[in-house]
Structures are given as C-alpha cells and as structure tokens.
Image (cartoon, rainbow, N blue to C red):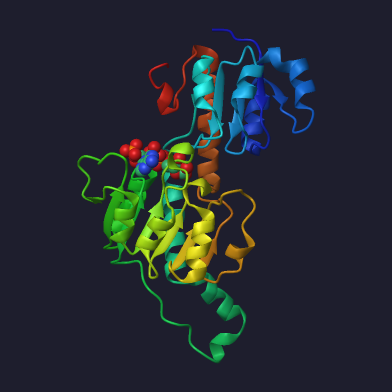
Amino acid sequence: MTRTGAVLRIPRLSKRMNEGLEASYDVLDLPDEGRDAFLAEHADRVVAIACTGNGLVDADLVAALPRLQVVVNHGVGYENVDVDACLAHGVLVSHTPGVLDDAVAETTLGLLIATRRRFVEADSFVRAGRWSQEGFPLTGQVAGSRVGILGLGRIGRRFAALVDAMGCEVAYHNRREVPGVPYRYAASATELAAGVDNLVVIVPGGASTAALVDREVLDALGPDGVLVNVARGSVVDEPALVAALQDGRLGAAGLDVFATEPHVPEELRALPNVVLLPHVASATVPTRNAMADLTLDNLALWWSTGRLRTPVPEMADEV
Ligand code: A2R
C-alpha cells in the first residue's frame, strides 16, 4: 500500500523518535502558539500523529485534521488521546504495552523500599554529618509485609512477582477478579487498603480512575501505611493525600506522578515522609528505546499495511 501525507509530531518526543520519524516521513511539528494558523495551512496534509503522554490529542484536534487516520502514542497510558473521538472519526490508536513492565516494576519496588526504609532521609542524615553524633532511627521493612496492588495488570503482575519473592503477602483490587493468580482479591480499593501495610497504585489514568484513592482509602491504609503511586497523579486525590500526611493519618508516600506535572505542591515538598520522583518509572535507556521502537514499528506497519502492532484495547477489533 502506498500512502502519501505527513506525520504531525506533538513536541516533545525523544531523540530516537525524532530521528526515526525524520528518516522515513514528511514531518510537521504542532506549534504551541498559533495553532489555528498552522492548521489552516497544513491540516489537509496530516494522516498520522506521533505523540507521547503530554501531547494532547483532543476531539478538536481530531476534528481539525480531515485526513487523519492513525495516532501512535509513545507510552502505555493514553489518556492524553480522546479515543472516543478517534473511534468516531475512524482514526486508529496505538500504545506501547509490555515493553516497560520491568522498568516500572523495579521503580515501584525501589520507591516502596526507599519510602518504607527512609533512604532519602538517611542519605541527608549522612551528608549533614549527623552520623558521628547519633544513629539513624529504626524503620519499618518491606520484606514479609502485606502489599496491596491496585491494578494487577501487566505491570502489577511483574511487581507482584518481585514482592512475592521477598516473602510479602500480596493482595489486589481490579474491577474484575483475575482467574488463576495466587493473590487475595479485595472487592474495593478501601477493602484492599484496610488489609495491607503498603498500597501500590498501577491502574491507568483517565476519568474512570480519577480520585480512586480518596480520603476513605487513605484512612483505611492508616498511620502506619505507605502509599506508592506510579500510575497517574489523577488517580490519587492529591489534596486529601497532603492532608492525610500532614495530619499523621497516613504514614508515608512514594510518588512518581502528580496531579499537574511538573508542578509538585509546596506542601508535599515540605514533608519529610515522602519520596518524590519526576515521573521516571519507565525512564531507562533500554526501556525508552524499546518504547520508541515499538511506536515507530506501529507507524511503519500502519503505513505499509493499514494495521497496528499494538492497538489500544478499545480498537483491538478494528485492526
Ligand atoms: O479493572 P480491570 O479488571 O480492567 O483491571 C485493570 C485495572 N483497572 C482497575 N482496577 C480498579 N479500578 C479501576 N477503575 C480500574 N481500571 C483498570 O488496572 C488492570 O488489571 C490494570 C491495568 O493493567 P494493564 O491494562 O495491563 O496496564 P499496564 O500495562 O499494567 O499499565 C498500567 C498503568 C498505565 O496505564 C500507566 O498509567 C502506568 O501504569 O504506567
């Protein structure tokens, strides 16, 4: 199949993505300013969009591109893409499932251990020269603890295997029970939180999970509980989280994601019992390379056959 047309790139993409796109396609960059003028001039050339999590593909953009047929998203989460609008316009969407599971699972474990064992505070303690005057306080531990996983999907299962190997008792909550897994199922997020020491959040973002972890869930986790979020900031009610940490109703939190990145509330940054990461769960060289390659593979396959390697689940029947 021979296709003509341009790929619209929504900045910023990685160097590997940019080089891959520029090597094979006619590429246009969607500007931040002056979009209307840009679209008036170029909209009828665009057949594909390449984007990542912070590139918004909303209903207006889809409607403004009359020849758009495919969106390739660099990332497993794709709540930045209005899939309903794409479906309505016959536009296919791909994402990058599977290739980041190990990196995100190891970040999750590292963040949980760093939070529970207070590694960041311990590092500051050594740097400040305090070790010669006093010992660092004893902490809790992850090995042998009860770990709850909110979202036992591809990443959640990989993480479950890691903590299972550490002798942890693993429980989970999904909307549906997963057949054949050796972990205890909890019927709600609150029930899950009430029965564990550590609650780890690995569900997709978007409207259906917005504030799934609310005050009730945080209170169920309690003053000795640790919350780890590697999903999306939207899944946790951030003001409720700040209040629970400030009041001592929640023990500690390890956070890779925030409600309005890269903004991190001053109240969170002031708390000693939080470990804060700049959304780096999948940010390793091998994993980001694999994500870029899978995104480019999807585009190349669509360009030559009209099919996608890894369509989002909503359109698995369409390709
Ligand atoms: O609910 P189910 O049975 O569809 O299970 C999915 C679960 N999940 C939820 N659990 C509770 N309440 C919800 N409203 C809800 N929505 C989804 O999350 C499934 O077990 C899990 C997601 O797994 P996967 O689709 O395999 O995604 P993956 O690759 O593990 O990535 C998860 C997320 C990404 O979307 C990024 O936001 C983040 O991790 O990196």
- Residue 15 at x, y percent in the picture: 66, 38
Asked whether, in this view, residue 273 is left or right of residue 17, the answer is left
The residue at the point 50 percent across, 58 percent down is 240
Asked whether the viewer can see residue 301, the reply is no
Q: Quadrant of residue 89?
A: top right
- The one nearer the camera, 88 or 302, is 88
The quadrant the C terminus occupies is top left
- Residue 99 at x, y percent in the picture: 44, 39
Asked whether, in this view, residue 6 is left or right of residue 37, the answer is left
Image quarter for ligand 1: top left
- Give above or below for 318 relative to 202: above
- Residue 304 at x, y percent in the picture: 53, 13
Asked whether, in this view, residue 8 is left or right of residue 103, the answer is right
The residue at the point 26 percent across, 47 percent down is 187
- The one nearer the camera, 198 or 306, is 198
- The one nearer the camera, 172 or 117, is 172
- Give above or below for 7 relative to 241: above
The quadrant the N terminus occupies is top right
- Give above or below for 102 relative to 43: below
Q: Quadrant of residue 32?
A: top right
